[in-house]
Each structure stands twice: as structure tokens, then as C-alpha cells.
Amino acid sequence: MLFTKKRNFVKLIDFGFANFCRHKHIDLHETKGTPYYISPEVLKGNYDERCDLWSMGVVAFYLLSGKFPFMAPTNEKLKALILTCDYEFDEEWQGVSLAAKKFIRGLIEPNLAKRLTCEQALQHPWIQ
């Protein structure tokens, strides 16, 4: 992420593996990406475009707390935390609204059937 002084916006970078999504549903199998942002299904090697919603939840978590939801000294321990979805809202979150926390929980959701869709995320009360 890059913060600029001239304007009030965040520029996301690290799109080395990005591509246009031309189909409604794409099955992917290679594990790629920055470890802190990788979703459980990417680690398992069978994922689709919904993994990006998890990553956006990680970005939102970081922007609101200054920390990643999953932190570990090694990639193996980080992977275990992500696979078990072991994170919490600690003392940095005391002043953060319940709506913001629900938004993040909806994105950092290991069950794809329960994870917010793009449309749901855009319509979330915290975003609105």
C-alpha cells in the first residue's frame, strides 16, 4: 500500500499476479501472493476470484488497526493461523465501530458461502 500526501486516497500495489476476470467464475490452483493477504482457499490450492475479498478484509483490518490480522514469525505458523482463521480484535479496536468490525468479519470469513460477495461488500452499512 502506498499513501500519498497530495490526495486523500490509498493506492494498492503488488499486482504482479493480477489479471482481468473475464468469466463469472474462474478456478485457480497455484499458490501466489503476499503471505499476509492469502486466503485459506489459496493455501489449499483451489480458489477463485472470491479470495480477493478476503484480501480486502485484511487490507481493511490493517488500515483500521495498523496490524495484520494474522502475524507469525514463520510462513508455516502464518499459514496455520490463516487456515484456522485465528485472529481477534484487540485493544486497538476499542474505538472502532461495530459496523466496521462486522464488515471485516464478513470478508475475513473462511466459509465461502458466508463470505461477503463484492455486491454485499459495496452495500454494507459501514461502506455506505
Image (tube, rainbow, N blue to C red):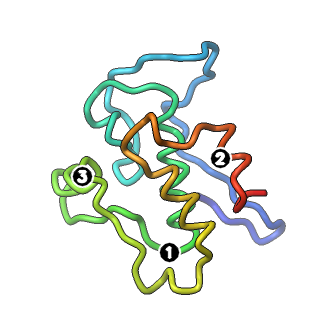
Name the residue: 40% across, 20% down: 28
User: Which quadrant holds the C terminus?
Assistant: bottom right
Distance Cα–Cα, label 1 vs label 2: 21 Å
List x then y, in percent, for residue 84.
24, 52
Q: Does residue 22 sit above or below 3 in this rendering?
A: above
Image quadrant occupied by the N terminus: bottom right
From the viewer's side, name the closer residue of 61 and 89.
89
> Which residue has dot 1 on it?
66
Residue that carries the numbered disc 3 in the rendered image: 84
| Residue 125 rendering spot, x and y as whole percentages | 72, 58
Q: Which residue is mark 2?
A: 121
**Residue lying farthest to the right in this orientation:** 7
**Disc 3 secondary structure class:** helix
Which residue type carries mark 2?
Ala
Nearer-N-terminus badge (1/2): 1
Q: Amino acid at mark 3?
A: Thr
Give the residue at x 77% y 71%.
5
